[in-house]
Image: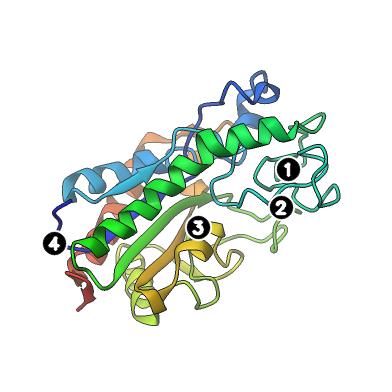
Amino acid sequence: MTVTKSFFISIPHSGERVPDEAPWLMHLEEPILMRDVDRYVDVLYKPVIDRLKIPSVVTQWHRYAVDLNRLPEDIDQASVAGAENPPGKFTQGLHWVKTTQGEALIEKPMSFMTHDTLVQKYFAPFHQNVATLFSEFKAEGFARVFHLDAHSMPSKGTSAHRDPGQDRAEIVISDFLGKSCSVEYKDLVVSSFEKAGFQVGYNFPYIGGRVTQTYGHPDRGQESIQVELNRKLYMNEETKKLIPEKAEKVQKMIGAAVENIWSHIDGDQIR
């Protein structure tokens, strides 16, 4: 890998493919199956990723089967038979039991063998790719590596969220309560999305997920930040269909924000 800037993007929730090992998901109606998928986030970020040749890790696999922003131990007895945690502990865990609207996804818990297969085939490769990028940047001599984890969110909180019924910002930026990246990097990401025209919130209702928690260690030169995009800006939240004219505008705004972040990273420093 030969690069001049230590920056990359991951998109862990845009995948729509249901693994063969998760047949319980295969006959769900589209609005339910896509209820909590970060649908189109990969499409919205792709032009700027391609234009600037930004390294990226993007999944094709459905988060209800294996949520890449969780940990393998984020399971309970409703999702995996014999799990240590009681039912309800991880309703939206590694394997989703219910949607954020309460629709049932898993009728009976899967076996530990199925759980292990899902972890090995779908969870591990994604995380290995993220870890490899950090390692490769450091092998190139970069002391700091900047990582943006891109997501989307419903426009209003549900009973499964910290903000039930509340309207949300257009962008929510999270740094695990200041632990996953430096203030310098957080301020750059916030200002970049604001300059692009977004109304930005910080650490509410999301503080960051397992990706930022796992990889965000600024004391080791690993800076991770989570960016949530409000779905009402570009899609019909009920039908899960893209609204082309809105999406085109948001795509350009995201491009401007990411390009501003990119332009302020000089090697492994922020200027």
Looking at the rendered structure, which numbered label has been put on residue 158?
Answer: 2
* Residue 29 in picture, x, y percent from top left: 65, 22
- Residue 144 in which image quadrant: bottom left
Q: Are marks 3 and 2 in contact (CB under 8 Å)?
A: no
* Residue 43 in picture, x, y percent from top left: 35, 38
In 3D space, how far apart are the residues under numbered discs 2 and 4 (Cα atoms)?
42 Å
Q: Give the residue type at disc 1.
A: Gln
Q: Are marks 4 and 3 in contact (CB under 8 Å)?
A: no
In the image, taking residue 260 as reference, residue 29 lies left or right, namely right
The residue beneath circle 1 is: 101
Q: Give the residue type at disc 3.
A: Val
Q: Is residue 238 visible?
A: no
In the image, taking residue 115 as reference, residue 188 lies left or right, namely left
Q: Earlier in the sequence, mark 4 or mark 1?
A: 4
The residue mark sitting in front, 3 or 2, is 3
In 3D space, how far apart are the residues under numbered discs 3 and 2 (Cα atoms)?
22 Å
Q: Give the residue type at disc 2.
A: Thr
Estimate how packed mark 3 is, as few (under 14), some (14 to 19) or many (20 or more) residues with alpha carbons within 10 Å: many
The residue beneath circle 3 is: 211
For the point 22% across and 69% down, which residue is it? Answer: 142
Q: Secondary structure at mark 3?
A: helix
In 3D space, how far apart are the residues under numbered discs 4 and 1 (Cα atoms)?
44 Å
Q: Earlier in the sequence, mark 3 or mark 1?
A: 1
Estimate how packed mark 4 is, as few (under 14), some (14 to 19) or many (20 or more) residues with alpha carbons within 10 Å: few
For the point 58% across and 49% down, which residue is it? Answer: 154
Q: Earlier in the sequence, mark 2 or mark 4?
A: 4
The residue beneath circle 4 is: 4
- Count of number-bearing discs: 4
In 3D space, how far apart are the residues under numbered discs 1 and 2 (Cα atoms)?
7 Å
Instruction: Tell me if residue 216 comes above or below residue 157 in the rendering.
Output: below
